[in-house]
Amino acid sequence: MAYTINELLKSINEQTNKLDITGEPKELYLPVEYCIKNGGKRIRPLMTLIACDMFGGNIDQAMPSAIGIEIFHNFTLMHDDIMDNAPMRRGKPAVHKKWNSNTAILSGDVMFAIAYQYMLKTPEKKLKRVLEVFNETVIQICEGQQYDMNFETLNNVSEAEYLNMIRLKTAVLPANSLKIGAIIANAPENEINNLYLFGELFGLAFQLKDDWLDIFGDEDVFGKKTGGDIVANKKTWLYIKAFELANKNQLKTLNEAFNNKTVHPKEKINTVKNIYLQLELNKLAIEQMNKYYKRAQDYLNKIKIPEESKSNLSHLLKMLVERKF
Amino acid sequence: MAYTINELLKSINEQTNKLDITGEPKELYLPVEYCIKNGGKRIRPLMTLIACDMFGGNIDQAMPSAIGIEIFHNFTLMHDDIMDNAPMRRGKPAVHKKWNSNTAILSGDVMFAIAYQYMLKTPEKKLKRVLEVFNETVIQICEGQQYDMNFETLNNVSEAEYLNMIRLKTAVLPANSLKIGAIIANAPENEINNLYLFGELFGLAFQLKDDWLDIFGDEDVFGKKTGGDIVANKKTWLYIKAFELANKNQLKTLNEAFNNKTVHPKEKINTVKNIYLQLELNKLAIEQMNKYYKRAQDYLNKIKIPEESKSNLSHLLKMLVERKF
């Protein structure tokens, strides 16, 4: 392991800041630049570089695919925000709001192609495999997003269905971000597989923490209002568990809150959050996240490289479960 | 040259008919199947196979990229129809009308990824180059579509600007469809280049004929109402030339017709078509198309392979200029 997390993040940010996306027509490329350079945690490209580095690979060889993955991730956000009619992204107007839907569709499409341009800079010996992994990821994310949209109009979504949706929509990308870094570093197949499974669990834990923060986060630290998922009737783990665990009265209250379209958002949030607390979902969600955390750690323990080489990934996982925003 | 056009088309249609796009969630994949299996002339994949075949390549090696190109082309139609708010495609409701915009966005995205899946089946020796050509094409098509959308709100579009837009949006894909087939067949670089330039001119001629048919086509043969481009104020070669050649009175009539939002479509079409005929644009457009046709033929003549090996491409070009729908 040759680099610290901060060094890797610094390299990624240098790369994304100097990305040249200033072509013509500017109506196409300005939204791309706006989207990519508007921050974000850069977790996925970081995972690609960490995975490459921990198996002794040359991170310069993994950098193009890391950047490609980040551009691709931002493309999915741009299209998802249209579909979810989400007005804001990272504290700024989403592209479809700042410009319009057509702009967000087409600038998203070109971002997708730009992402592939970066993936194509992968060393030729690894190119086909890396592209196959990447492409499969893209397809799974589309499937996940479709399930998520389907769930909007369904009343009954099981925990298993929910987890499969989240796996596809959220967990496969970090898992394959790691995998791609490990492939480029010539890691052994069984270790690539362990890393993939670590990444999936990482993704599930990440999403659970996201859902928890949306309801129970400290608004001052979280940086935005809590309760957005409740207002939007979003099928989260908390939502699904609440319906599973609620008694008759609680069920009635939940149904009324989620189906009453005239209730004030503040009141709706309070009502639902209150039931969540009665059911101790604030604790159960953290327990569940810790299960994923431990299982992820188990896969990391299996990997036969010096412990110190795993410390970046171990540290990233810890930062994730402890994060407050 | 081992195959006739009909044999190649038959193979393409066999492949597209047996495409397995029946995965889950079906809300994602049904629109993909609907779109791909709803016909189309299959000209672009045909060009890939013809190019491969004419240089003695194995068409089985070019088939996956041919299919990938066709899937990609259909993806662009699915997204373009949202952006252009076009209700129909090949005589059936467009995906965003039959389902909704979100479906057309996401099913389009997954089609884009499926297209890459097919491109990835290109023989490994040629893979990187073919993907680079393909990816560059995707980006150029996005740029062309953006210029086309920009033109909607511009009053003055020069012929040069128009031709650049059409080159990007329409001509680069047939040009690179040929190029990809020739690359797979190991054609010499200078011949690949001649073929590309042939393809670009083919594309320009194709678009001009499209525009001509939209106004001057025989409705019974054309299969749809003529004049759609006039009703939509679309900046076509005919539109741009009309404003260039019109005298003061004709200019006034054109401006009135295109800016009057209350006039009946039928009347608008008649008024504009009448001016086009006064300016002899029906003939000028065909003359212009024939110029492209001859220049394309010149590039084909330059290619140093037996004349009989060129006959498919020569025949395709001829079919194009003579087509009535």
Image (tube, coloured by chain):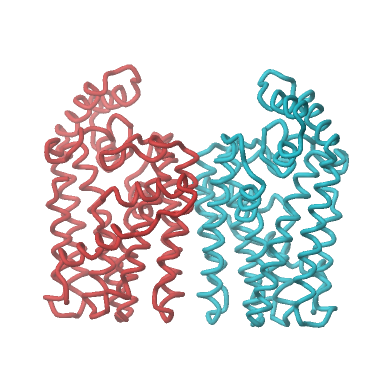
Chain colours: A cyan, B red
State which quarter of the image contains the N terminus of chain B: bottom left
In the image, farthest residue toward the front: A248
Of A278 and A192, the residue lying toward us:
A278
Residue A27 left/right relative to B71: right
As drawn, A173 above or below B153: below
Q: Which residue corresponds to the image point at 22% horizontal and 27% vertical from the top-left?
A: B269
Residue A35 left/right relative to B162: right
State which quarter of the image contains the C terminus of chain B: top left
Q: Which residue corresponds to the image point at 78% horizontal and 41% vertical from the top-left?
A: A214
x then y, percent, for residue B103: 47, 42
Residue B216 left/right relative to A134: left
Of B269 and B66, the residue lying toward us:
B66
- Asked which quadrant contains residue A180, the reply is bottom right
As drawn, A301 above or below A236: below
Q: Which residue corresponds to the image point at 19% horizontal and 50% vertical from the top-left?
A: B288
x then y, percent, for residue A205: 75, 55
- Asked which quadrant contains residue A188, the reply is bottom right
Q: Which residue corresponds to the image point at 70% horizontal and 76% vertical from the top-left?
A: A52
- Asked which quadrant contains residue B242, the reply is top left
Residue A288 left/right relative to B216: right
As drawn, A53 above or below A167: below
How many numbered markers are drawn?
0
x then y, percent, for residue A220: 88, 39
Of A158 and B140, the residue lying toward us:
A158
x then y, percent, for residue B219: 14, 35
